[in-house]
Image (cartoon, rainbow, N blue to C red):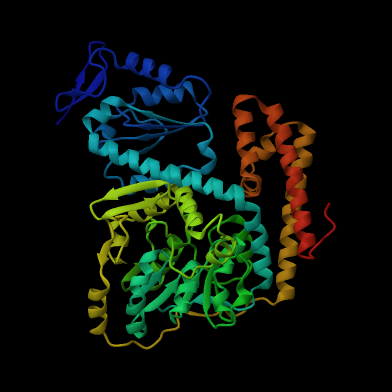
Amino acid sequence: MLEIIPTKTNLLTAVINGQALHSRYDPLKESQRFVKSSLTGEYPSTVIFLGAGLGYTASLIKETFPQAKLICIYYSADIFKESKLTPWLHWFPGAEITLLNFLRFNLKELELEGLRILKWAPSEHIFPEIAKTAATALQQALKELRGSLVTTLAMGKRWIQNSFINFLSIERVLTPSSHKYNLPLFLAGSGPSLEQAASLLHRCRNKLIIWALPSAIPYLIKMDITPDLVIITDPSFYAGYHLYPLFNKSIDMAAPLSAVHCSRQIKGGVLLISQSNFFEEDLLSRLNLKIPKIPPQGTVAATALQLAMNHTSREIILAGLDFSYSDIRSHVRPNAFDNFLIPSANRLSPLYNKLYSLAAQRAPFINRTVQGSFRTGLTMNTYSGWFAGLPDHISARIFRLNPSPVKLDNIQTIDAKKLAGELSEQSPQPETNIFIPAGNYPDRQQRRKICRDLLTVWHHHLHTAFKQTKRISKIGSFINDPFLLTFSYYYDPGSLVKIKKTLRLTGENEAMLQAASLLEREMDFIESMAARLELRESYV
């Protein structure tokens, strides 16, 4: 029960089931002490306030740090209604969007720099369950952002380069038709549990659509199971190496332009996916084709699932998405990585010693249950957290076949025997062409011109900003330009974070010098990429 009562200083406090949310004497002075003790040191870039109350603390944070982004998480819709509303981002129970998706939408990778998280202790005591749920959602969102930032730091330039290489080299492009699959869709990952599905896939092959992640390909081909579609998003060589068993096979593939360039390995068509990255969009927008848009989630399994949701109205069955190690095994065998690991083993460094070392490094967390123990790691926990956060209306038609010990409470489980029985009662359905060859796809010469023109536009934009930054010795032309910030994030997010921190703590002059240096390196990058692709122009 919520009561709003006056305090000794004629301000208001909230009392919930006898517990006061703010001081019964002077809530303003209480908030002043909290802000002063909690936000010492550096000026924050972003503040997330968990358990926001009637607005005293949030208003003080905004007054003290007006340039900081403030996100308030309320633990009660009634408290939110009674709060002093000022212009800050907020979420409360019962909002149209889940807290996890709210955080995903309103928090960006660069905002991790200078981020401060505050917790209002009385709210935690009064609403312990909601506080726990909020902490879990925030932890998941931050893990995803950190993972995205680390991945971009390692792969950003390669994504841009791959996009141009793929745009030039892919000759057979598919586009979605108006149809959807009328069979259950089986999505195969490479976790050890995939082995338990092999016999089922053989018996029921004509009653299932099979999609596969790259790492599952060597095992599926060995078991004489040919998938209908392979989904690949990884930009690295090793992702493409998984596909060697498909060499010269007519298998369709779904991939963003930024994925590893491997379309020549297989004879099927390529369904292009837009992950809404600026470099992909700049190229794909010139094709005048229907391109599925699927924002990246850090794992190809999430991309594949979202694509599947769009193209089947039936059940989606997950297998081999274990999010854990089985003892020291991370995947079914054969696996492409084994081809690198096995030859390096010797009597001084046996294979099992290598496998144990890798398991201890990549999956250091040992979880013990009554059924036994299993290993997980930070990356796997982040991926499983994404699936665990799927809303009910999406997860309702998703099933896990013979799942691993990592539980996902929102996704139903089904065993192979039960699934085989259900499929046996269904009649085989005629094959439907879900993805069809794209018409009016430009030839290679036209695509070369598109690439050349686009690189010229980018280079001109960077060069103009570089000259302006140097001329006026101000960083505004850099920091306020969406294209420059976006390009710099993918080219070198580490330098962009450094510029952001320098501007926040040291001042504009030093940040301007760093920005000019970054712009110069970016122009060199475009020139070297144009030369590599034999698209060199005379840049101004």
Residue situated in front as seen by the camera: 147 or 366 = 366
The residue drawn where x is 75% and y is 36% is 469
Residue 337 is at least partly visible in this image? yes
In the image, taking residue 174 as reference, residue 414 lies left or right, namely left
In the image, taking residue 48 as reference, residue 394 lies left or right, namely left
The residue drawn where x is 73% and y is 43% is 519
> Residue 392, image x and y in percent?
28, 58
Task: Identify whether 122 is placed above or below 24.
Answer: below
> Residue 91, image x and y in percent?
34, 40
Residue 285 is at least partly visible in this image? no
Residue 341: name its quadrant.
bottom right
> Residue 284, image x and y in percent?
60, 66
Task: Identify whether 339 is placed above or below 323.
Answer: below
Task: Identify whether 345 is placed above or below 198.
Answer: above
Residue situated in front as seen by the camera: 398 or 504 = 398
In the image, taking residue 308 as reference, residue 371 lies left or right, namely left
* Residue lying furthest front: 347
The residue drawn where x is 42% and y is 52% is 380
- The number of numbered badges drawn on the structure is 0
The residue drawn where x is 37% and y is 15% is 33
> Residue 261, image x and y in percent?
63, 68
Task: Identify whether 134 is placed above or below 226.
Answer: above
Q: Quadrant location of the N terminus?
A: top left
